[in-house]
Image (cartoon, coloured by chain):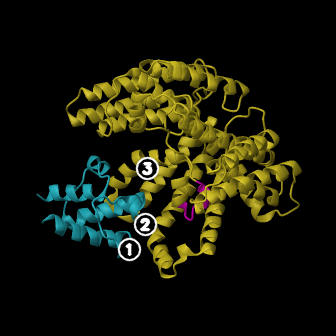
Chain colours: A cyan, B yellow
Amino acid sequence: MNRNEICEKLTVIFQEVFGDNSIVLRDDMTASDVENWDSLTHMLMITKVEEVFGIKFKLKELNKLKMVGDLIASVESKLQ
Amino acid sequence: MTFTSFEFLLFFPAVVILYNLCPKNLRVWYLLAVSYVFYALMQPVYLLLLVAVTGVTYGFTHWMGKTEDEKKKGRIMVVGIIFVLLPLFFFKYFGFINDVFFSCLRLIGINCTVPAIHWMLPVGISFYTFMAIGYLIDVNNEEVDIETNIGAVGLFLSFFPYILSGPIERAGNMFPQLKKMPTSQPLDLSSGAKLMLWGYFMKLCVADRLGIYVDAVFNNIPQHNGTTLAIATLLYPIQVYGDLGGYSLIAIGAARCMGIKIVPNFNRPFFATSMSELWRRWHMSLINWLTDYIYTPLSFALRSWKVWGIVCALMLTFLISGIWHGAALTFIVWGFVQGVYLSIEALTQKRRSALESKYNLTQKWFYLLICCLVVYLLFAFSQIFGRCVTLSDAWLVITKICSDRGPVFIDRATFAYGGLMVVVLFIKDFLSEYHTDFLFGFNSKHIVLRYTTYILVLFLILLFGVLDSSQFIYFQF
């Protein structure tokens, strides 16, 4: 799966979990840029990402995800 | 010596002047010595405990640094956390667990006791313990570099502006600053002084003024009717905001005068439109700590339960928050109530968001006002458990509020002066919240208006402040 396909799938997940169909992902996007993205919805989003891509994160990896670009890179490396 | 004592007014400027005269490479040791003197002036014996926790934290982080094996490193961290927690457990929770455990044994007919310990709680122990634990976990997660200067570790845990009541600092924010130890710039001094001035206003004019009424009512619950108790219950969250919020601003301002930026602790909490937003604005340093080190690992471990995993993680996190506040059933119920509020919000968030989007409610002032009021009422109710000493007292307050109406106990001076001070506080917070482009008061562009505001606030403190060196509520935690 290439980066664009990962981005497309992540966009759908973000729109569904955060309840906003207008979300367009950017690499530098953080929780403060998305309404409803807080510590409660964050874990729901991570669970959905694991389900959709069939991957598993470690807690240490999650702590290092500071922006959407980090998440895309992490998913990409796990799928390789 | 507390922030509101006369001694501090002499001590603090002297500390700042000597800090700037001190060579840069000695500033960490200078501030460490000052912080230890500040602590020793309150509780000299317990300074040894603070030094011991510093030694344990320093030793265990270094041991972790020399260990390659991830699992072994994790085990060292756990042992380090246990050692750091031991004094907190012994001083704060031993008596409570002792009581509960032997009460349970008596219920099944076994009569035995261990002598209760009635030692004074070391001031600030909950705060520096949490900071030490946070540092140990951050080292294990490779979030921060291991600090090799034991003086910096000592100062991180004991820095005098926050040692007594927070904000709960993080290694990642403090260590880079402790390496630089900058000379105070004019902007640092003016910003720090402004924060301290407003902090003193919040503490002396709002918290201590309202505290006269709230304490008079809550210390004599059986003598007051439900109407009076309802008013005291509604005032108590503002008193705590003034008290801990004021303390935090003085701490942040004091550190800022030396060029050190401490994390914020309050962000106009009574303009929150949901409980989760309130907890992002109220005692932020504690909530961020709990989120990073308790809630996130728990919700991660329980993520396969989806939203119910989040509910369980929330409940456990706020129960721990309640226990952190104190070893009493009232604080456990307080934590439970917060957990219930947030769980209900988590379970209904999607529907609420959909409704808000459909009717564009977040742009309507009356909807925001109603949300703010509901959040305030829910929070004030939960704070009954934070204010009352026993569960039976809390239950008495609740039943009286629901059933026992009557004439209000009026303390004219407190109502008049306290009410005026609360209005000033809310106007300032309202303008900062909704009119960020309107530069007023301390931030006015005009020097005359700025200085008029400083003098006015100083005047309010001298005229309406309660100037008797009272304690801060959070010293007991």
Q: Position of residue A3 (x, y in %)?
A: 16, 64
Seen at 69% across and 40% down, the residue is: B200
Q: CA distance from mark 2 to mark 3?
A: 19 Å
Q: Amino acid at mark 1?
A: Asp
Q: Amino acid at mark 2?
A: Glu
Which numbered tag is attached to residue A20? 1
Q: Position of residue B210 (x, y in %)?
A: 76, 48
Q: Are marks 1 and 2 in contact (CB under 8 Å)?
A: yes
- Can you name the residue that lies furthest to the bottom here? B358
Indicate left or right for B467 with B31 as reference.
right
Q: Mark 2 highlights which residue?
A: A35
Seen at 35% across and 58% down, the residue is: A30
Look at the image and say whether residue B254 sits in the magenta stretch.
Answer: no
Split into 4 quadrants, where in the image is the N terminus of chain B? top right
Task: Give the answer, above or below, for where B319 lies relative to B70.
Answer: below
Q: Position of residue B430 (x, y in %)?
A: 64, 60
Q: Mark 3 highlights which residue?
A: B291
Question: Label 1: chain?
Answer: A
Split into 4 quadrants, where in the image is the C terminus of chain B? top right
Give the residues in magenta. B268-275
Callout 3 crowding tier (Cα within 10 Å): few <14, some 14–19, many ≥20: many
Please say whether residue B234 is visible from this viewpoint. yes
Q: CA distance from mark 3 to mark 1?
A: 25 Å
Task: Give the answer, above or below, for where A64 lies relative to A4.
Answer: above
Which of disc 2 and disc 1 is earlier in sequence?
1
Seen at 76% across and 53% down, the residue is: B232
Q: Are marks 3 and 1 in contact (CB under 8 Å)?
A: no
Question: Label 2: chain?
Answer: A
